[in-house]
Amino acid sequence: MPTSKIHALIHSKCPRCHVGNMFEGSVYGFSKQKTKDVCSVCNLTFEIEPGYFYAAMYVSYAMSVAEVVTFALATAVLTGSESPWTYMLVLFATIIIFAPFNFRYSRLVLLHFMTPKISYDPKWELIEENIKKER
Ligand SMILES: [Zn+2]
């Protein structure tokens, strides 16, 4: 059964095969997370052209704005505070806490939804399933 795009995105899988992992390390682990150069299953080069992940900065920016606005509104509703220091503290913490998440998911959103050159090919999943059956 083919893996859905959303499932592949949430689990940081390759946009072409939905099987290979796109990153080394976890989002919030002690080891540094790193984008792999190529997919271990379908051999797709993730950075499809030099500097391609600069475009992920725009996605990351949009995600940061959405998070900051959400947390600012939540702080206003929950605390009713008018002190700018409350907002500074909450929003600074929000930006720091979400930074690793934004790093990973901005690249994933870019490759899964905003890169017309890469499309899902279910043959890789079938090949992987057959390899697993043979073991
Ligand atoms: Zn792949």
Image (spheres, rainbow, N blue to C red):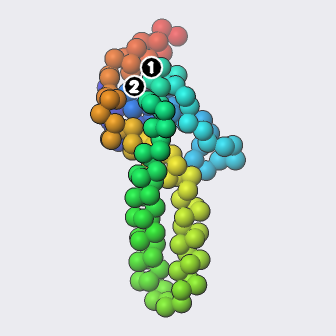
Residue in the image at 49% along x and 38% along y: 51
Viewer-closest of 112 and 127: 112
Marks 2 and 1, the one that precedes in the sequence: 2
Q: Would you say residue 25 is visible in this rendering?
A: yes
From this view, report whether residue 69 is shown above or below residue 9: below
| Disc 1 residue crowd, few under 14, some 14–19, many 20+, Cα 10 Å | some
Amino acid residing under circle 2: Cys
**Residue occupying image coordinates x 45% and y 54%:** 60
Kind of element beneath mark 1 = loop
Query: Eyeballing the image, is 91 above or below 41?
Result: below
Depth check, front residue: 4 or 89: 89
Front residue of 84/12: it is: 84
The residue at which mark 1 appears reads as 42
Q: Is mark 2 within 8 Å of ligand 1?
A: yes
Residue lying farthest to the right in this orientation: 30
Left or right of residue 99, residue 58 in this image: left
Q: Position of residue 111 (x, y in %)?
A: 39, 37
Q: Residue furthest front?
A: 50
Give the SS element for disc 2: loop
- The numbered mark at residue 17 is 2
Query: Horizontal and vertical percent for residue 79?
Result: 49, 86
Q: CA distance from mark 2 to mark 1?
A: 6 Å
Q: Quadrant of residue 84?
A: bottom right
Which quadrant of the figure contains the N terminus? top left
CB at mark 1 closer than 8 A to ligand 1?
A: yes
Residue 7 in view here: no
Q: Residue at x 49, y 89 (%)?
A: 81
Where residue 118 appears, as percent x and y from the top left, is 34, 29
Q: Residues within 10 Å of mark 2 (few under 14, many from 20)?
A: many
Q: Are marks 2 and 1 in contact (CB under 8 Å)?
A: yes
Q: Amino acid at mark 1?
A: Cys
